[in-house]
Image (spheres, coloured by chain):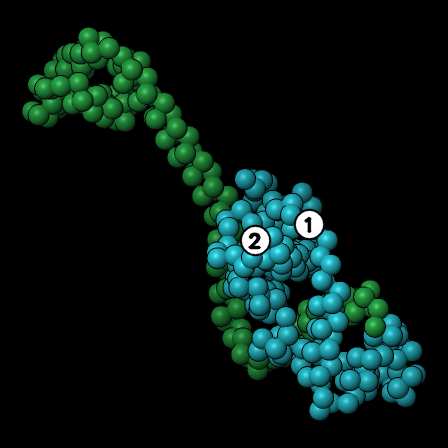
Chain colours: A green, B cyan
């Protein structure tokens, strides 16, 4: 048996699987499918399930990409704001407090009213960036 | 990342297939998934994804169906080809990778394909041990005879030829579902 011939025949036998299924319709198709253990209603459900998943996949991919970009941006923003010297950080903190007191837009938790060390200050500023209250340069963002 | 959906037209074409066409495609995907390690719905979803990302114009349900059948076949053979390449290069892989598709390594020529095709034919032939007519038909097809030539060679009329063909096809489908053929 030549290699080409056996490859061709295997392909032909596989193609015939579709030819056979494709040759049937209506009740005859349902009966045949049921006879080989494939419930017609279950096949319709499979089709719908696969279609929904395929249609949702690109949207999910876009969402995941947007989320990754946001994470990268926030991460970069943290890096910038945390690199400021303590005086600059305190200045940003004061501006946030002043803004909070003036607008009543937000309430600063009591534990954050008096920050003991730079670590606490960094955590507070990180939270403000995450919340979209300030940008990477420490500027208050208008809402 | 795959191309975005080009409008709702392509998705609508998938939703517009008749019930019989949907059943056939789901059944075919299930049959073709045997031995791949994937579910039929995975193959179907992959075929839909290719259709949604394709530049091929939307024509009619028959053309859409044909595209999906070819996509299922292609995804199936990619799975087998990829498995063989991975096995050859790294041993049996422990788990599937998310970005398995479109791996250029998969495109490498498979020197074992012809041997496997011969084994496949032999399996079908042996499984037909109780049906001499199907075995005769298989041997005649192996010689590349046309339906008319085969009928003449075997002294069958068209009706008989079609009946034996049908029996053979249905047995191949059954054995595929039972995992006897891959």
Q: Is residue A14 above or below residue A27?
A: above
Left or right: A95, with B143 as reference point: left
Residue A14 or residue A1, whichever sits in front: A1
Residue A13 or residue A46, whichever sits in front: A13
Left or right: A110, with B138 as reference point: left
The residue carrying mark 1 is B107
Pointer 1 chain: B
Pointer 2 chain: B
Q: Secondary structure at mark 2?
A: helix
Q: Position of residue A113 (x, y in %)?
A: 9, 20
Q: Is residue B18 above or below residue B105?
A: below
Q: Are marks 1 and 2 on the same chain?
A: yes
The residue carrying mark 2 is B90
Residue A14 or residue B4, whichever sits in front: A14
User: Within 10 Å of the Cα at label 2, are there few (<14), some (14-19), or many (20+) other Cα atoms?
Assistant: few
Instruction: Name the image quarter holding residue A127.
Output: top left
Q: Position of residue B108 (x, y in %)?
A: 70, 50
Q: Position of residue B115 (x, y in %)?
A: 74, 67
- What is the quadrant of the C terminus of chain A in the image? top left
């Amino acid at each position: 048996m030549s290699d080409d011939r056996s490859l061709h025949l295997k392909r032909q036998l596989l193609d015939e699987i579709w030819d056979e299924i494709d040759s049937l319709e209506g009740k005859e198709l349902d009966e045949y499918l049921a006879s080989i253990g494939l419930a017609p209603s279950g096949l319709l459900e499979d089709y719908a399930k696969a279609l929904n998943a395929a249609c949702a996949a690109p949207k999910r991919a876009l969402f995941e990409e947007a989320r990754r970009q946001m994470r990268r941006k926030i991460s970069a923003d943290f890096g910038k704001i945390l690199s400021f010297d303590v005086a600059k950080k305190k200045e940003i903190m004061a501006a946030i407090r002043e803004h909070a007191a003036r607008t009543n837009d937000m309430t600063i938790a009591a534990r954050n009213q008096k920050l003991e060390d730079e670590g606490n200050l960094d955590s507070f500023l990180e939270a403000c960036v995450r919340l979209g209250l300030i940008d990477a340069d420490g500027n208050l963002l208008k809402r | 990342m795959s191309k975005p959906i080009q409008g709702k037209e392509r998705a609508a074409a998938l939703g517009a297939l008749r019930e019989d066409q949907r059943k056939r495609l789901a059944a075919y995907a299930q049959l073709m998934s045997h031995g791949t390690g994937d579910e039929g719905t995975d193959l179907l979803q992959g075929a839909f994804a290719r259709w949604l990302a394709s530049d091929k114009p939307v024509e009619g349900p028959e053309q859409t169906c044909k595209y999906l059948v070819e996509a299922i076949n292609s995804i199936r053979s990619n799975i087998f080809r990829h498995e063989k390449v991975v096995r050859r290069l790294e041993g049996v892989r422990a788990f599937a990778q998310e970005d398995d598709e479109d791996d250029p390594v998969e495109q490498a020529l498979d020197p074992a394909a012809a041997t496997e095709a011969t084994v496949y034919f032999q399996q079908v032939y042996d499984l037909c041990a109780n049906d001499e007519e199907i075995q005769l038909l298989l041997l005649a097809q192996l010689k590349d005879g046309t339906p008319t030539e085969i009928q003449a060679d075997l002294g069958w009329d068209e009706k008989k030829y079609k009946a034996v063909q049908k029996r053979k096809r249905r047995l191949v489908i059954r054995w595929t579902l039972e995992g006897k053929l891959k």
